[in-house]
Image: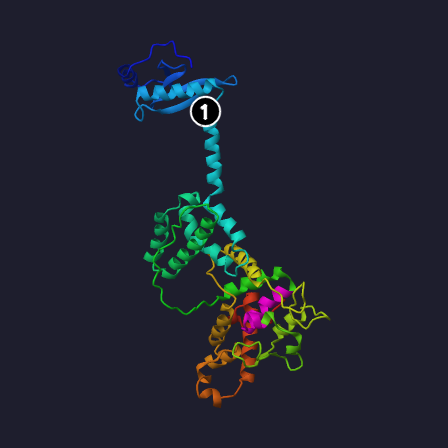
Amino acid sequence: MGFSRIKPLTTKELDAIAAKRPHTIKHRALGGVPGFVLVHTPAGFTGYALIYRFNGKRRKLTLASTRAMSLADARKVAARHRSYIESGGDPHGEKLRARQEATQFQERLDAGTMWEKYMKLAASQLRSRAEKDRVFRLHILPTVKGLPVTEIKRSHVLEIVDKLVAAGKLRMADKVRQEGAAWFQWLLEREHVERNPFAGLRKANVGKTIRTRVLRDEELHHIWAACEHEGSAWSAWMKLLMLTGARNSEVREASWSEFDFEERVWTIPAARAKNKQPQRVPLSAAMIEILGGIPQFADTDRLFPALRNPRNAMSGDQKVKDRIDARLRKLLSDAGGGEPENWRVHDLRRTVATGLQRLGFRPDIADQVIGHVSGTRMGAAAHYLHYRYETEKRQALEAWSRHIGEVVEGTSRNQGNVREIRL
């Protein structure tokens, strides 16, 4: 290794130079090692660097600040790098490449990117996929956005959870804990991280709650419009759920032989009913019109047959619901509304029952319409009360169909202009 012909500066001389700020960036040769210089800036920074050439191009390798390293130690470090340079090395270029690789690695491990990868590989088939994604984007992402998952700490998690707890949103706080822990467990299994910052958090004491979600008329209006893009089968499935209040499986797994169009009634057999009792659902004009738009096939009795095996009912309802949700959000946004509250297909049953009471029908009639075993049919009453409310159920469902028609068409009931649903 060669030595600089310049007389090495002493520490005292270096301090004298650093005491005065230059007008522009200055490089002062420190001697002892070729290219070993002091970098002095107008901002007051002083540091050590090594200037050299590699493949004919000038390079400057920053070593350390004068506060972090003594002059003697810096000269030794510069000497080692100079020896490496003279053997063909390029320490500055290697430092840049290492920094670029680290940046690329951090970008690959970006929280948002890794969440999308998790959703694609681990959660794409889950029925709760849309809700998981909603919880992450509303409550977790704002705090960890831009961070690689390796830098997400317990302090970030506590910031998210404590904020929800302080707002009284205990159930959501617990859901954040669950979803975050599952995500990081997946990251741990793939060795992307070394610890799970969501693990070990105390579960929020939310107690047992009864779901009370009832969709507003505005939401029903937009859901009806959003499902129009799903084709005849899936569109009819969602509309029948909204009109009948039946369970998802009862509609999706229905057969044509269950429908009596002369009597205008759909009989759900006991084998498919949750309460193991046959359920007769009066068909309104709107329901019959929807059923008339569903194609029938000679090789199956299924109302909604699967494409590959017509003997089975169609599947994939959660993915359809996710797409409807996406359109619902856009429609509400375009109409000046806010982010819709999470809803489930099963909430349509509660919406129908509540809506019938709002229209003036007694709770026991609403229960009979949706096939729910009410308090009047429990205990000894179940042995003696066998009236099936056939007339009342038909009146109720006809009234509900008219109401949905008004909701879809945007007709005010106060105008007295009641119209059937236009499909």
Residue 240: give x, y in percent of width and height: 59, 70
Q: Is residue 417 among what the camera can see? A: no
Q: Is residue 157 among what the camera can see? A: yes
Residue 192: give x, y in percent of width and height: 46, 45
Depicted 62 relative to depicted 194: above or below: above
Specify the quadrant of the image occupied by residue 282.
bottom right
Depicted 407 relative to depicted 172: above or below: below
- Mark 1: which amino acid? His
In the displayed structure image, the side of residue 345 where residue 309 appears, left or right: right
User: Split into 4 quadrants, where in the image is the N terminus?
Assistant: top left
Residue visible at 64% across and 62% down in the picture: 231
Closer to the camera in the image, 178 or 234: 178
Residue 256: give x, y in percent of width and height: 66, 75
Residue 31: give x, y in percent of width and height: 36, 13
Whether 284 is among the magenta residues is: no
Residue visible at 59% across and 71% down in the picture: 251
Q: Residues within 10 Å of mark 1 (few under 14, many from 20)?
A: some
Depicted 134 relative to depicted 369: above or below: above
Q: Residue furthest left?
A: 12
Residues rendered magenta in the picture: 233-250
Give the structural element (helix, strand or loop) at label 1: helix
Secondary structure mostly seen in the magenta stretch? helix
User: Split into 4 quadrants, where in the image is the C terminus?
Assistant: bottom right
Q: Residue furthest right?
A: 298
Q: How many marks?
A: 1
Residue visible at 43% across and 49% down in the picture: 141
Q: Which residue is mark 1?
A: 92
Closer to the camera in the image, 88 or 412: 88
Specify the quadrant of the image occupied by residue 21.
top left
Query: How are the colours assigned in the image?
Result: rainbow
